[in-house]
Image: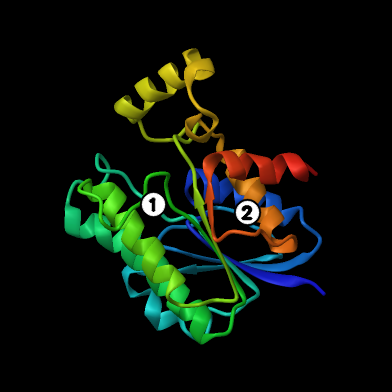
Amino acid sequence: MQKIAIILGATGLTGGILLKQLLQDDSISTIKLFSRSSSGVKDPKVREYLIDMFQLERETERFTGDVVFCCIGTTKSKTPDKETYKKIDYGIPVTAAKLAKQNSIPKFIVISALGANPDSSVFYNKVKGEMERDVLQQNISETYILQPSLIGGNRSENRMGESIAKFFAKTFGFLIPKKYKMIEPETIAKAMQNLIYKPYSEKRIPSDKIKEIVESNPN
């Protein structure tokens, strides 16, 4: 039986890669995109809803399917205002999880970050940790929280600090423990796709385990 997938964040790096993968997946009949700007993808599978993402709760009737992929996220440099930052990195994923629970969507897969902790003194880690906690409180049948380390790939916007970190990660990668090694967005997207069909034993999946999911089923 073919499935209906929902993607939040399809205009971002990982979300865009995931969208391309699902377009080639014959088991997916429909891909619903919820975002504030168009992905630019024209395909019979795609239904695109351009909305105010801070009012996602209004989309109850259209937010139906078999699996939700939440690839939403921002950065301190892109969103310096902490209140807006939290609305994006916490508010959107948690609202999506509540809608998924309300509409009996059985699978919810969200990208978080390594180091997420609701008790952290670091604002970024604290927000991600609070998001994870409140997504899990929805008790969706299958919830998977991916916790990647530094994400590789080429982004449209310039992130100087991230570029420097990527340089050192590539140059001195042999010194970095597996859990903290840089991970490519294609690997994250492929793991998300694999989780549609093969359950995982844990709800939180750190960076090294994300890679293992793909290595165990690379096709």
Label 2 crowd (10 A; few <14 / some 14-19 / many >=20): many
**Amino acid type, callout 1:** Gly
Q: From the viewer's perspective, is residue 43 above or below residue 188?
A: below
Q: Which residue is mark 1?
A: 73
Q: From the viewer's perspective, is residue 150 above or below residue 104?
A: above
For the point 19% across and 46% down, which residue is it?
Answer: 80
106 and 92: which is toward the camera:
106
If the image is split into quadrants, where does the C terminus sit? top right
If the image is split into quadrants, where does the N terminus sit? bottom right
**Can residue 51 be seen by looking at this rendering?**
no
Where residue 201 appears, as percent x and y from the top left, is: 64, 59
Q: Which mark is residue 192?
A: 2
Where residue 114 appears, as percent x and y from the top left, is: 42, 44
Q: Secondary structure at mark 1?
A: loop
For the point 69% across and 50% down, which residue is it?
Answer: 21
Looking at the rendered image, the disc whose residue lies closer to the viewer, 2 or 1, is: 2
Are the residues flagged by discs 2 and 1 in contact, CB closer than 8 Å? no
